[in-house]
Amino acid sequence: RWRKPRMVARHQGVVLQNRPEIQCLRIGNDPSGIFVSSQDLLRELVEAYAHCADRRDANGQMSLFTVDTHFVVYMNAKDPTPSMELHSRDALAPVFADLNKYDATTHFVGQSTIFTLTDDRATGEAYCLAHHVTVEGGKRRLMVASLRYHDTFVKIDGAWLFSERRLYVDWIDERPLS
């Protein structure tokens, strides 16, 4: 499973500033220790997905999903019919391996919003500008896709995972690179 490079000791759930809608984890045993909100951990999950995609770490990317995950792609966000629909973590392998056809990618994660949040479930939306560089016949091309992800998250054994990820492609631009 992919882990953001930082040392995390034991943690326990706490409420930040008497605001139960902000669920936090205390890292370590020190009462004045570092607090990490569930929202921050969900944002890290979304960013880990992009990081693994750009590093071509398909196994790491797959580890961010539940075993019975539901992954749906809408290549045209205005069309209610999915272009692809997968129903397991293992089914994601060829999708993530397909990124190997690009010379380079950069998935720039923009705003993310958490819509609902409980102790072990959450929903949200994240925006991403995905840059894909190809090289054919010595010529480089750039494809930029504006993506929106509608996510359902679940916490299993203390870790947040994607249980459903709906990818909507809002627009695509293609052009030559110098």
Image (spheres, rainbow, N blue to C red):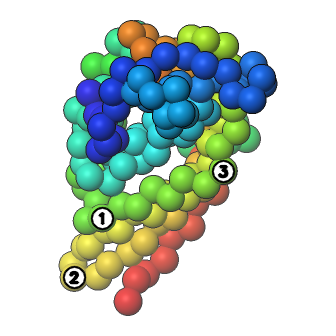
90 relative to 49 in the view: left or right:
left
Between 169 and 2, the one nearer to me in the picture: 2
Mark sitting on residue 104:
1
Q: Is residue 81 above or below residue 175?
A: above
Q: Disc 3 or 1, which lies upstream in sequence?
A: 1
The three-letter amino acid code for the residue at tag 1 is: Ala
Residue 141 visible? The answer is: yes
Q: Residue 6 in the image: state x and y as whole percent.
A: 32, 42
Give the position of the C terminus as an image quadrant.
Answer: bottom left
The local crowd at label 2, few if under 14, some if 14 to 19, many if 20 or more residues have their Cα within 10 Å, is few
Q: Which residue occupies 29% across, 82% down?
A: 139
Q: Residue 133 in the image: state x and y as whole percent.
A: 35, 68
- CA separation in Å, label 1 and label 2: 15 Å
- CA separation in Å, label 3 and label 1: 23 Å
User: Quick one: SS at disc 3?
Assistant: strand
Query: In terms of image quadrants, where is residue 65?
Result: top left
User: Quick one: SS at disc 2?
Assistant: loop
Residue beneath label 3, please? 111
Which numbered mark, 1 or 2, is in the foreground of this view?
1
